[in-house]
Amino acid sequence: MDEEQKLPKTIEANAMFASEIGSFTHKHAPLEIKKWKEVSNSVKTKIRNSLSTNFEFKWTNSELRKYVEEKMAKTFRSWRNKLYGHFKKHAHDLEYAQAHPPEEKLWGERSINEWEWLCDELYTNEAYVKRCKINADNRNMKEYNQCGGSRPYPKYMEAQLKLKFHDDRRRLTTAPPFSGDGEWRRVRPTSEYVLLGFTQFVDTKQLSC
């Protein structure tokens, strides 16, 4: 783990960490509840402990606990929203909808009883349907959409810096040593300048690539 960012050190490791949180949340979180706040501490602990299989970290770190908790909650809400999207396709026939849960890729190995509960108690609940509509309307009103995906902001910026570095290096190393005043001049390879500048920047910002 990155001691400064309190996240996995590399962009790839962080993506895997986020994916693991999602997978274990889908596997262990109860579906027969109205809100994430109703999930017991024992279930949350089970999800956190499952993450220890591939990652070493200290749960005494409050920032890390907060990140994982928020990621679990966000994953849970997003997943149930996708399940609701499947339900709405057959909402005109409740009996048919109950008998046809989503495909395994989305539903996983959850039981048919859990799907029936969602259909009967949540997805037909007037307050829930109204809240989903309000949330959808609010999303449509946004002028700009988030572009970082599931990455935490530090990892999103790190990825953008790496992308910009490779793009600048490609453009500069393929550009001719043209002075701009109509003459060709011998110049130091641009890749050396780019590498030097990027290295200094990384050292200054203490990024982990």
Image (spheres, helix red, strand yellow):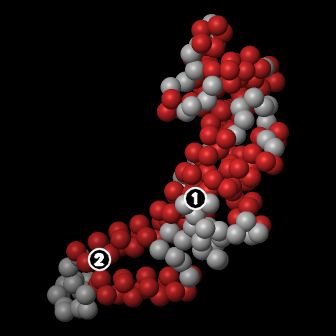
Specify whether residue 47 is in view.
Answer: yes
Q: Quickly name the residue at label 2.
A: 172
Residue most toward the left? 184
Q: Give the vertical position of 85 relative to 200 (above or below).
A: above
Q: Give the vertical position of 16 relative to 74 (above or below).
A: below
Residue 157 position by quadrant: bottom right
Q: Give the vertical position of 194 relative to 75 (above or below).
A: below
- Amino acid marked by disc 2: Leu
Q: Which quadrant, please, contains the N terminus?
A: bottom right
Q: Residue at x 30, y 83 (%)?
A: 191
Whether pointer 2 and pointer 1 mark residues with C-beta atoms closer than 8 Å, the reply is: no
Total count of labels: 2
Viewer-proximal residue among 76 and 181:
76
Viewer-proximal residue among 186 and 203:
203
- Amino acid marked by disc 1: Thr
Q: Is residue 9 left or right of residue 187?
A: right
Crowd class of label 2 (few under 14; some 14 to 19; many from 20; radius 10 Å): some
Q: Residue at x 79, y 41 (%)?
A: 39
Q: Residue at x 62, y 36 (%)?
A: 79
Residue 89: x %, y % from top left? 57, 17
Residue 59: x %, y % from top left? 73, 65
Q: Quickly name the residue at label 1.
A: 53
Q: How far separated are the C-alphas under marks 2 and 1?
A: 43 Å
Viewer-proximal residue among 160 and 29:
29
Residue 153 position by quadrant: bottom right
Viewer-proximal residue among 63 and 50:
50
